Amino acid sequence: MKKALPIILIAGAAILLLSMRRRPSVTVTADMPIKQTAEEFEAEFEAATVKPKPSLIDAGTNLISTLFAKKTAQQKAGKKAQATAIKRAVKTKTATRKQAKAVTEALKKPIFIRGFADDKVLC
């Protein structure tokens, strides 16, 4: 304990000096206040909030990319599984094609239990 006491005192003194150090204060003054009319304010506000319209090329590119979006492997596998389930149901005569498609569409939707979401369920 006697050997640690000087180290503790030096560390405490250093912390005390750092906490008591004066920091320079900065003052900000406004020499000339900016005067603005309501019309100028509205014009500036409109200019800041109005987004420029996208060019025709950008709009076309966005439209094509949304219409022909690449499907993920999971989406492709889901479609394949749905088609297989429909074929199997029709082949075994358990349901018509329309009924089987309706069932598989209903099964695609997530199960919702009041108070729980899919990402909040504990495993």
Image (spheres, rainbow, N blue to C red):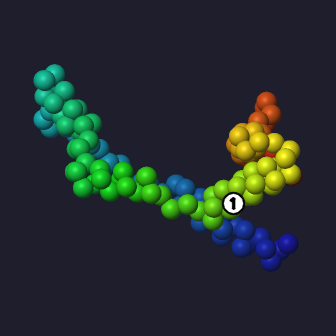
Apparent side of residue 123 relative to residue 108 in the rendered image (left or right): right
Q: Residues within 10 Å of mark 1 (few under 14, many from 20)?
A: few
Q: Position of residue 59 (x, y in %)?
A: 29, 50
Residue 39: image x %, image y %? Answer: 13, 24
User: Is 114 left or right of 12, judged from the image as shown?
Assistant: right
User: Left or right: 65 with respect to 74?
Assistant: left
Camera-side residue: 27 or 107?
107
Q: Residue at x 55, y 56 (%)?
A: 19
Q: How many marks?
A: 1
Give residue 117's position: percent from left, percent from top: 74, 40
At x 51%, y 62%, the residue is 70
Judge whether residue 23 can be spotted in this image.
yes
Q: Nearer the viewer, residue 94 or 62?
A: 94
* Residue 112 drawn above or below residue 4: above
Amino acid type indicated by mark 1: Lys
| For residue 27, above or below residue 81 | above
Return the residue nearer the eye: 73 or 36: 73
The residue located at (70%, 55%) in the rendering is: 83
Residue, far top: 38
| Quadrant, the N terminus | bottom right
Inspect this view and state whether residue 117 appears.
no
Residue at 16 percent across and 30 percent down: it is 43
Q: Which image quarter: residue 103?
A: top right
Task: Estimate the x, y position of residue 2 in percent, counting from the top left.
Answer: 83, 74
Tell me the SS state at disc 1.
helix
Q: From the image, tell me which residue sits under label 1.
A: 80
Query: Could you say which is closer to the camera, residue 34 or residue 20?
Result: 34
